[in-house]
Amino acid sequence: MERFIFHMILHFLVPFLVAKVFWKENWVRPFIIMCLTMVVDLDHLLADPIFDPSRCGLGFHPLHSWPAITIYLSALFSNRLRIAAVGLLIHMVLDGTDCLWLN
């Protein structure tokens, strides 16, 4: 349970730090946008069970799939989508760290 709580804190702490470093004075909007990318976790509702601490979400959930991650990477090249893409990629990296704990 502690690992889950730490994981959730990181999902907000890392975007906060990234926003503060890269968007110094105007960090609030990027931080909010990156936090809103947490909506990708709605794809967990398609899984049975919805939450399984022994499952690696990368490659399992549709919005955590490798094709989706490729789209997030390509969105980095769009000025309009860049902040959301950064948030989504941070999310994928943090979820990927959970996969490391499983092995």
Image (cartoon, rainbow, N blue to C red):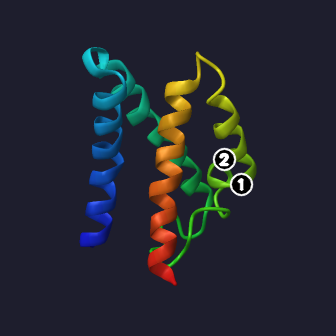
| Mark 1 crowd level (few <14, some 14–19, many ≥20, 10 Å Cα) | some
Residue at 36 percent across and 48 percent down: it is 11
Pinpoint residue 26: horizontal percent, then vertical percent: 30, 15
The local secondary structure at tag 2 comes to helix
Q: Position of residue 10 (x, y in %)?
A: 31, 52
Vertical placement of residue 82 versus 43, above or below: above
Q: For the residues labelled 2 and 1, say whether their Cβ atoms are less than 8 Å apart.
A: yes
- Left or right of residue 103: residue 72: right
Count of all numbered marks drawn on residues in the image: 2
Question: Would you place residue 100 above or below residue 18 in this image?
Answer: below
Mark 1 secondary-structure assignment: helix
Left or right, 73 with reference to 5: right
Among the 4 quarters of the image, the one containing residue 31: top left
User: x%, y% of residue 100?
Assistant: 49, 74
- The label on residue 69 is 2
The residue wearing badge 1 is 66
Residue closer to the observer: 48 or 11? 11
**Mark 2 residue crowding within 10 angstroms, few (<14) / some (14–19) / many (20+):** some
Indicate whether 91 appears above or below 18.
Answer: below
Locate residue 47: give its quadrant: bottom right
The quadrant in which the N terminus is found is: bottom left
Cα distance, mark 2 to mark 1? 5 Å
Residue at x 33% of width, y 45% of height: 14
Residue 40 numbered mark, or none: none
Q: Amino acid at mark 2?
A: Ile
**Label 1 amino acid?**
Trp
Q: Residue at x 46, y 65 (%)?
A: 97
Residue ID at (70%, 34%): 74
Q: Residue furthest right?
A: 67
